[in-house]
Image (cartoon, rainbow, N blue to C red):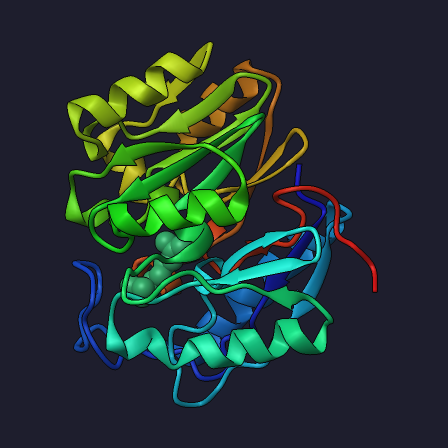
Amino acid sequence: MTHRVLMCEPVHYRIDYEINPWMRRSNRVDGARALAQWRRLRERIEDLGVTVDLIQQAPEAPDMTFTANAGVVLGDRFIPSNFRFEERQQEEDHFIRWFRQARYTVETIHLPHYWEGEGDVLPAGDQVFAGYRYRTEYRALDHLEEVLGRYLVRVELADERFYHLDTCFAPLGEGHAMYVPEAFTADGREHIERHFDDLIAVGPEESLRFACNALVVDREVVMNTGCPETVRALRERGYEAVESATDEFIKAGGSVKCLTLMLDAFGPVVET
Ligand code: ARG
């Protein structure tokens, strides 16, 4: 699985607005603590042999540290998101500029349909799963499918707290995945259940600690702390959890996976 990601040091990370049920302006971010948590997370990811590319955070884009929402990357092509909320739309240009300067070809998908990148689109073996409803529109996926040249297994989300697919679903490779069953409509759940030989159903407590919002690096699963049942379930299947505290980021509704964009999700990185 992934060996190269894009991250953004949260030097301007704040809660300035409320666009998901986790965010409360009154629940202030402790800036120093957030930076320390992010740096530790970066170290843990690098210790696994993953290359971390960095984009600088724009002062006026407090959520830009959640790079998973930038778009998706296919080899040397970058397809940027159309953010649902105005509050995050200004990030689009910053990400596009970074990818252009890194010599990627930028291919946009039709406006006005909104979609939020790897937050809602995750490859799993030879399938690609796409979550929709809160941040990604069903119609956007029609076009994304053409641009990707891949069929998308569309799963509808059903709980606002799990507003992006990566908050409630994590493909682990080799027919395994973790998911939060209640976060999907009955149909959505069935699609997931049909595609995997073995699913870890994450319970209510650990799902709210973002257990599924994990970055999978071969057999290592980088995830938030405080999810002992998930850690055990992973271990039983031959996976090792690498725990890293992200509670400052959970205040904005994100954890490990949201803080990383896989640059090799759809095939190897093309060096230019
Ligand atoms: N505050 C951000 C938002 O609401 C958090 C994004 C989390 N990212 C993710 N991939 N789930 O947009």
Q: Position of residue 251 (x, y in %)?
A: 29, 63
| Residue at image coords 29%, 33% | 155
| Residue 154 found in image quarter | top left
Left or right placement of residue 50 versus residue 230 in this view: right
Left or right placement of residue 76 versus residue 96 in this view: right
- Residue 199 is at least partly visible in this image: yes
Question: Which of 195 and 179 lies nearest the eye of the viewer?
Answer: 195
Is residue 255 placed above or below 188 in the rendered structure? below
- Residue 15 is at least partly visible in this image: no
- How many numbered marks are there? 0
Residue sitting at the far top:
197
Is residue 232 placed above or below 245 in the rendered structure? above
Question: Which of 231 and 181 lies nearest the eye of the viewer?
Answer: 181
| Residue at image coords 54%, 63% | 107
Left or right placement of residue 265 versus residue 116 in this view: right
| Residue 189 found in image quarter | top left
Ligand 1 - quadrant of the structure image: bottom left
| Residue at image coords 47%, 45% | 146
Q: Position of residue 53 (x, y in %)?
A: 69, 66
Q: Position of residue 129 (x, y in %)?
A: 42, 34
Question: Which of 18 and 28 lies nearest the eye of the viewer?
Answer: 18
Residue sitting at the far bottom:
59
The quarter in which the C terminus is drawn is bottom right
Is residue 255 placed above or below 174 in the rendered structure? below
Question: Which of 186 and 159 lies nearest the eye of the viewer?
Answer: 186
The quarter in which the N terminus is drawn is top right
| Residue at image coords 40%, 20% | 200
Q: Position of residue 192 (x, y in %)?
A: 35, 22
